Amino acid sequence: MRIAPCDFSRDGHTIQAIFNHAIAHTTALYEYEPRDIARIADWFAQKEGKYPVLGAFDDDGRLIGFASYGPFRGFPANLYSVEHSVYVHPDHRGQGIADTLMRALIQTATEQGLHMMVGAIDATNVASIALHHKLGFEHSGTLKEVGFKFDRWLDLAFYQLKL
């Protein structure tokens, strides 16, 4: 496995497919509708030059997961804090890919002089919560029943890592 920056023209459709699988089958994203390719292009454009989109590529060069971060809230006082996300293709989960991506993302954030990484995780996502604990993130609070998906209320847990 190789970790490298993603590129919209090469990786946009795979990222779209990974996002859309998560939307349709998990509570990792509190969304109902699939993302079209224009939205993925806009997502890349918002990150360009400031925020990384790191990909995990298999030995054949196929994208099998990605991680990124962007602004946390967006107010001037939050400049040194970012909210991150990590997604792995469903056929490759449980292989340590998210761990490798997160370590690379943390290193990038540290090199950029950021102060805090924040993860907003569905409270039932035990795998993601375990990964964040393993990487040193601390639980900083849970917002009860702030989402509704798959006919149930969802709690959103926040985890943070001081860089």
Image (cartoon, grey):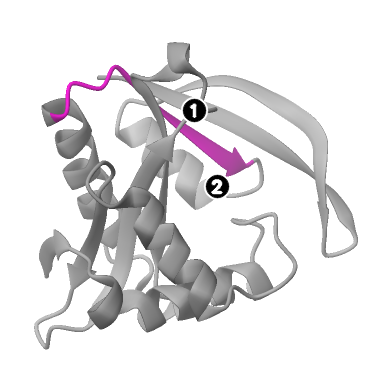
Kindly identify the amino acid type of the residue bearing the numbered disc 2.
Val
Nearer-the-camera pick, 86 or 123: 86
Residue at image x 22%, y 47%? 49
Kindly identify the amino acid type of the residue bearing the numbered disc 1.
Tyr
Query: Which residue matches tag 2?
Result: 126
Disc number for residue 50 = none
Q: Quadrant of the C terminus?
A: top left
* Residue 34 drawn in magenta: no
Percent coordinates x, y for residue 40 in the rendering:
46, 69
Q: How far apart are labels 2 and 1 at the CA level?
A: 13 Å
How many numbered marks have been drawn onto this rendered protein structure? 2
Q: Quadrant of residue 4?
A: bottom left
Disc number for residue 159 = 1
Q: Quadrant of the N terminus?
A: bottom left
Disc nearest the viewer among 2 and 1: 1
Nearer-the-camera pick, 9 or 18: 9
Nearer-the-camera pick, 129 or 149: 149
Percent coordinates x, y for residue 158 in the rendering:
56, 29
Chain part drawn in magenta: 112-122
- What main secondary structure does the magenta stretch of the protein show? strand
* Residue 115 drawn in magenta: yes
Nearer-the-camera pick, 48 or 4: 48
For disc 2, the neighbor class at 10 Å (few under 14, some 14 to 19, many from 20) is few
Is 148 positioned to the left or the right of 69 in the image? right
Badge 1 element = strand
Residue at image x 68%, y 37%? 156
Residue at image x 15%, y 35%? 107
